[in-house]
Image (cartoon, rainbow, N blue to C red):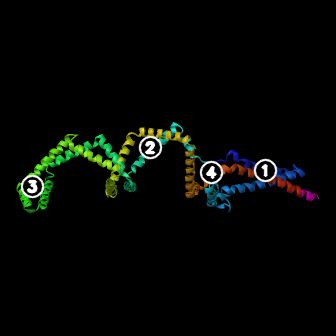
Amino acid sequence: MPSTPKRNRVGPLSLSIAASGFVALEAAHHGGWVDGTGWTLLRAGFEAAVIGGIADWFAVSALFRPVPRGRLALPHTDIIVRNRHKLTDGVVDMVENQLLSPASVREKLQEFSVSKVLFEQLGGAEGRRLAASTLSILAGHAAEELEDEKLRGFLTAVLRDEIRTLHLAPLFGSWLEARVAAGDTRVLWRTVAATLADQAQRGDFDELLHDLLQTALKAYKEEQAGLMGWFKTQLVSWTFDADTDSRQLRDGLTKILRAVSREPSHPLARRLDQAVMSYAAALKAEDAEAVRRISEFQLRLAEHPDLESVVGHMLHDLRRLSETKLRDSREEFEAALGNLLERGLTRLRGDSEAQSRLDQWAREALGSIVTRHHGVIGSTARQSLNRLQDRDLVSQLESRVGKDLQYIRLNGAVIGGLVGVVIMAGKLLLAGG
């Protein structure tokens, strides 16, 4: 056990004085050195002081340790250790239900202003730097979760709803006009024409062209009637060669497509642009047929089963891009966040209504958290108390209240002495009477 601090020696000193005085006066009395009423009263006072001091020493010691030690310890000593669970329950109840009850915490929260905390913490450059660094770390963690299945499903559902309800016709019409004016459609026509020309030259369309010619010939024959019609069909049949004619048609188509791919202002490209502009004008004017077509397209797109896969690929690409940018440009990102925080705080300082709304929201949110998780206060206090060993707990309590307890021992000796004097005086008075 550690030595008793100086400030805790009042009790032992008072008991030592009382015992020394009692022994000295008893020895002087039995030796015949002192006599008389005054000395008798003084001897009785010191005797009672010893009794009071010992009684209070026992009472104080019994709180913190067994008296005496070991197997000889008396019952109802070492009270704190023996009643530790009751004390813990009492402390937890006091903290949880009285000192930090939900009502008292919510009352205290009415004085809390989150806007003032933000101004204090983020008002300086260092505070904003730390906040930006923290937000940057959180952004990195958020980027890692972009491919979460639930997030993909949620965004897909939102996108489907938006596609279904979006009033797309005027917007799409304006966009098409802008693309034509910027020359983007010419690039599209040239690219498509070049691709189709390559496919035609490879013979990818030969079977299709052959079937189209056969279908056209059959339709022509069905339309003819009478003797003159019979002669016409025979003449066409004699001059028609599906293979040769389909190759000639393929070569002509390839030539036209090559011309379109090489000439930005090809007449066919201009006619396609005119068709797009006409369709765009119909969309902007909300022509019933044009709107119906775009609405059907929106519905098919919204219900397409591959839409979720498209969203997943977009989130995957966004995650890779975000992680790369955060890794390679973290300092720039944090600097941008710091500037954003500074501008936001500047606007918030000048907007008292926004401050009030922010403070009210914080109070309500914190109050709700306190109500839902109030048990955490008690469990935390209990865990903290249970974490201490018995003797550590006793030592901490004794170190905090030991001084006052030692004065209890002093008071016991003083009061006991005074009571002893009074009792002895009463006895002498009675004996003299």
Question: Sequence-wise, which precedes: disc 3 or disc 2?
Answer: 2
Residue farthest to the right?
Answer: 433
- For the C terminus, give its image quadrant: bottom right
- For the residues marked 4 and 1, what is the alpha-carbon distance in whole angstroms? 51 Å
* Mark seen at residue 18: 1
Boundaries of the magenta span: 427-433
Q: At label 3, which amino acid type do we have?
A: Ala
Kindly identify which numbered label has been placed on residue 136: 2
Q: Secondary structure at mark 3?
A: helix
Mark sitting earlier along the chain (4/2): 4
The picture places residue 366, in percent across and down from the top left corner, at: 56, 52
Q: Give x and y (percent) for residue 259.
A: 17, 42
Residue depicted at x 44% and y 47%: 138
Distance in Å between CA atoms under marks 4 and 3 = 93 Å
- Considering depth in this image, is 413 or 119 the residue closer to the camera? 119
The residue at the far left in this view is 238
Secondary element at tag 1: helix
Q: Main secondary structure of the magenta part?
A: helix
Q: Nearer the viewer, mark 4 or mark 1?
A: 4
Q: Secondary structure at mark 4?
A: helix
